[in-house]
């Protein structure tokens, strides 16, 4: 079983749509949780951290359920510029190594 | 935000040659740097953790004699792919952990193609 698993992609949605990404992790001792965005042939960039209380940043909302070992990302009112691969990332409990999911590709169409 | 550079950004080499990739933290000190590899349509896989002044820690399945890591200063780590083969062709990305905040910042990546 992979340490971090994400929805298989790609997601093809029209502009303005709401899209949700899901992620599960296997290590219950994982300490920190993030969503990264990666554009084609570029390095990943931190989108947002994820907290148990849930957090929102504009059109983006992230949720963490530690009991279910589940993380989600909701994007409202999708823009063309949201097209990218979204990576679910957790850290282990030994020195903060980042463990990446395989990513979910999003394509927002006009 | 903190800036991490990588050099070169892309390289094409012949099979059997060695390639050195540099990772620099430009405006902060990084005791710890990480090296990742990403194959097409796959996620980033951690190869090794580079610690300034000590030996790197390699992930399972990564050959330390093939992927030589040197972290000689608080702002520079190098990865040398020795005797590169076509299957080593990949996108190599480093990250540097900012000492004060324990946050990782990624370099722009190096695309290696081995012919």
Image (spheres, helix red, strand yellow):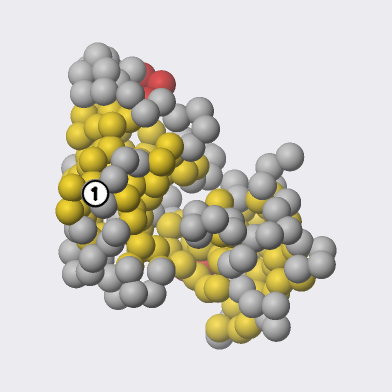
- Percent across and percent down for residue B103 are 41, 68
Of B14 and A50, which appears nearest the observer? A50
Q: Residue at x 68, y 60 (%)?
A: A29
- Percent across and percent down for residue B114 are 29, 22
Q: Which residue is mark 1?
A: B53
Q: Residue at x 28, y 32 (%)?
A: B68
Q: Is residue B68 above or below residue B22?
A: above
Number of labelled discs?
1
Q: Which quarter of the figure is the C terminus of chain B placed in?
A: top left
- Percent across and percent down for residue A36 are 51, 63
Of A10 and A4, which appears nearest the observer? A4
Quadrant in which residue A20 is drawn: bottom right
Check the image and name the residue furthest to the front: B54
Q: Is residue A38 above or below residue B54?
A: below
Q: Is residue B41 above or below residue B19?
A: below
Q: Residue at x 36, y 19 (%)?
A: B86
Of A73 and A51, which appears nearest the observer? A51
């Amino acid at each position: 079983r992979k340490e971090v698993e994400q929805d298989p992609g790609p997601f093809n949605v029209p502009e303005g749509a709401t899209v949700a990404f899901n992620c599960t992790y296997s290590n219950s001792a994982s300490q920190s949780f993030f969503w990264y965005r990666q554009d084609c042939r570029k390095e990943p960039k931190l989108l947002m951290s994820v907290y148990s209380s849930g957090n929102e940043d504009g059109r983006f909302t992230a949720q963490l359920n530690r009991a279910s070992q589940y993380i989600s990302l909701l994007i409202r009112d999708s823009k063309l510029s949201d097209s990218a691969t979204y990576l679910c990332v957790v850290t282990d409990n030994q020195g903060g190594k980042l463990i990446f999911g395989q990513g979910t590709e999003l394509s927002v169409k006009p | 935000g903190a800036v991490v550079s990588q050099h070169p950004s892309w390289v094409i080499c012949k099979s059997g040659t060695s390639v050195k990739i540099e990772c620099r933290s430009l405006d902060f000190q990084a005791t710890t740097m990480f090296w990742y590899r990403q194959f097409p349509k796959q996620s980033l896989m951690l190869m090794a953790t580079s610690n300034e002044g000590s030996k790197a820690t390699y992930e399972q399945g990564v050959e330390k004699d093939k992927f030589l890591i040197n972290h000689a200063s608080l702002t520079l780590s190098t990865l040398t792919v020795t005797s590169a083969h076509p299957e080593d062709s990949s996108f190599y990305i480093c990250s540097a952990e900012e000492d004060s905040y324990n946050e990782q910042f990624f370099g722009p990546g190096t695309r290696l193609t081995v012919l």
